[in-house]
Image: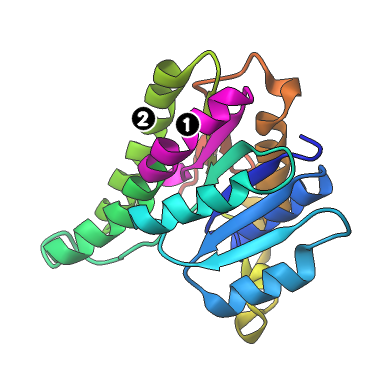
Amino acid sequence: MEGFSAVVTGGAQGIGKAITMALVEAGMHVVILDHDEEACREAERELSQPGRSVIAIGGDAASETDVRSAVAAALKLGKGLRAAVANTGISVHKPVTELGLDEWNQVLAVNLTAPFLLAKHAAANLARRDGAMVLIGSSRSVMSEPDWEAYGASKGGVVALAHALAVSLGPRVRVNCVSPGWIATGEWQAASRRRKPELSEQDHTQHPAGRVGTPPDVARLVRFLLSDEAGFITGGHYLVDGGMTRKMIYA
């Protein structure tokens, strides 16, 4: 990974920021595509290291033009594009009978169309360098609470998209999906919104791992899956949830 570049959508804050940091620490240059201008500027300043560039582009990961621009920027860095991470996600929480079609379409655009666009425009260049992609799903793809239909459907689609891409783009490009569970991201936001998470003992103990997750918990797996050490791993779906989806909880 040393000296190559990566594109991380939604990479300026939250889990995406931790992924960007992990890739920079692995020696990569990273181009971020994120809609939050404040977070973009902070990520550039905080994450760049000598000889390892972080370029943050303010834009829409569901815009084909913006995705194309981010990929083009990554091709100009170091040895060229070798990794891509589709990390964007939004949600609308309301009863399905009240969910507007425009809201449904917006969630699917950001959560599912955006990974498709990144794959479309990164695939050929990733193949030239035996690269890899990781799509960020969610534990909501395998479990549900009431009134999360748009989010759950979109993230279920991400899981399926990942294994479809693995088959279509292999063997030159590996594609995997990582689905976080409960991850406390408050300390990984833009400075104006940064805060310590308020978590109870019960929040932690409902996880067999004994705690709520943090963005680096996800980022370390993503970095591994993008590396040559994961060269025989493709088409997989990996829950990073502290075991929460395996534990039965009785009211």
Is residue 128 at all visible to an observer of this figure? yes
The amino acid at mark 2 is Ala
Q: Which of the 4 image quadrants contains residue 32? A: bottom right
Residue 207 in the image: above or below residue 178: below
Disc with the residue nearer the chain's start (2 vs 1): 1
Colour style of the rendered protein structure:
rainbow
Query: Which is more foreground, mark 2 or mark 1?
Result: 1
Residue 30 in the image: above or below residue 192: above
The image's mark for residue 25 is none
Residue named by callout 2: 160
Residue named by callout 1: 123
Residue drawn at x 52%, y 27% as measured from the top left? 175
Secondary element type, mark 2: helix
Question: Residue 136 in magenta?
Answer: yes
Q: Residue furthest front?
A: 76
Secondary element type, mark 1: helix
Q: Which residues are magenta?
A: 116-144
- In the image, residue 215 lies at what x, y percent? 67, 55
Residue drawn at x 47%, y 69% as measured from the top left? 35
Report, in whole angstroms, how far the alpha carbon at label 2 lies from the one at label 1.
Answer: 17 Å
